[in-house]
Image: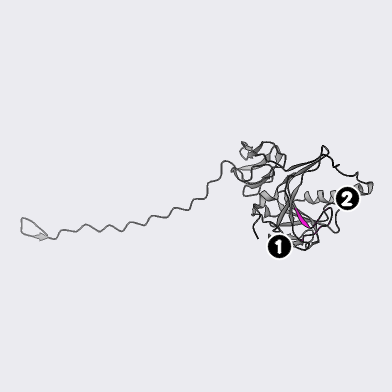
Amino acid sequence: MVCFAAGSCAPVPRPATPPPAAAPRPLPPRSPAAPTSFGLRGALSQGGLVLGTAPAGTVTLRLDGQPVPLAPDGRFVIAFGRDHGPSARLEAQLADGTTRAQTLSVAPRAWDIQSLPTLPKGTTPTPAFLARRKVELAQINAARAMNMESDGWRQPFRWPVLGRISGVFGSQRIYAGEPGAPHSGVDIARPTGTPVAAPADGVVVLAADSPFTLEGNLLMIDHGMGLNSAFLHLSRIDVRAGDPVRRGQIVGAIGSTGRATGPHLHWAMKWQAERIDPALVAGPMPRG
């Protein structure tokens, strides 16, 4: 209350209460920053497989000068053959015309080399064998040349069958000073009829109608992006060419068809022209 000299009084006006402050608006979630360099995960070694992410804006990708398929999300897969050199060059061409490149160190591996100085390499193949083999190789090459739509290459690979490893990738015999072909896959010894499962999603590109001379009943699955699996010496094949398969699906059974000394599964893998080690892709053999 305020009183003036004339004797009149008036109430003092109270200051107006300020309105409550508005709650701050939440910031929109930040999207992950686009990669500016290569992201790589896997075995940077001879026989190894690597999953990668290309720099943002990549339109083409090359490894040692050869084209590498690139998924719409910038993911890719590369691999290194048994005898790859100590380094590799990965190069991305960006939409703005610039180039990003990275030199990769490829670790060497010690291979199981067995010398057999008194044992000849083998007999001379007959014309009939060579003629039949030419047809078989044409089927295998045609299957590998297919480029099926599959995301199996993105998945963790599983062993198609569990058991004792009786043959390792990259091993080699020297017959009387003449090198034999390196072992192209992993052998798992199990009885005939043991089910074989797809190690990852894919599409069947070859299911032999009759046993091949060397591979026996041969099954091949394309996992996409140039990556495929081959299963040799099967006693039976449960799928047909063109069938999509899922990881863990039974696709056949172990046998000893073709050139085999006993029942086992020979699992081979290739990425483009490179033979790679399935044991590096699937990891240690689980127990049990």
Cα gap from disc 2 to disc 1, whole angstroms: 30 Å
Q: Position of residue 188 (x, y in %)?
A: 73, 55
The residue tagged with tag 1: helix, strand or loop? loop
- How packed mark 1 is, by other alpha carbons closer than 10 Å (few <14, some 14-19, many 20 or more), is some
Residue occupying the point 77% across, 63% down: 193
Q: Residue 98 carries which label?
A: none
Q: Is residue 172 above or below residue 198?
A: above
Residue occupying the point 9% across, 60% down: 9
- Where does the C terminus fall, quadrant-wise? bottom right
Residue 38 lies left or right of residue 63; in this view the side is left
Residue assigned mark 1: 249
What's the magenta bit mostly, secondary-structure-wise?
loop
**Labels 2 and 1: the sequence-earlier one:** 2
- Where does the N terminus fall, quadrant-wise? bottom left
Is 264 in the magenta?
A: yes
Is 54 in the magenta?
A: no
Identify the residue at the far right of this view. Answer: 127
Residue 109, quarter of the rendered image: top right
Residue 5 lies left or right of residue 35; in this view the side is left
Residues tagged 2 and 1 counted as in contact (Cβ below 8 A) = no
Viewer-nearest residue: 217 or 88: 217
Residue type at mark 1?
Answer: Gln
Q: Where is residue 164 in the image (x, y as percent from the top left)?
A: 71, 56
Q: Where is residue 137 in the image (x, y as percent from the top left)?
A: 84, 48
Q: Is residue 246 above or below residue 33?
A: below
Residue assigned mark 2: 135
The residue tagged with tag 2: helix, strand or loop? helix
Residue type at mark 2?
Answer: Val
- Magenta-drawn segment: 253-266
Residue occupying the point 48% across, 53% down: 29
Q: In this view, does 110 lie above or below 136?
A: above
Residue 102 lies left or right of residue 277; in this view the side is left
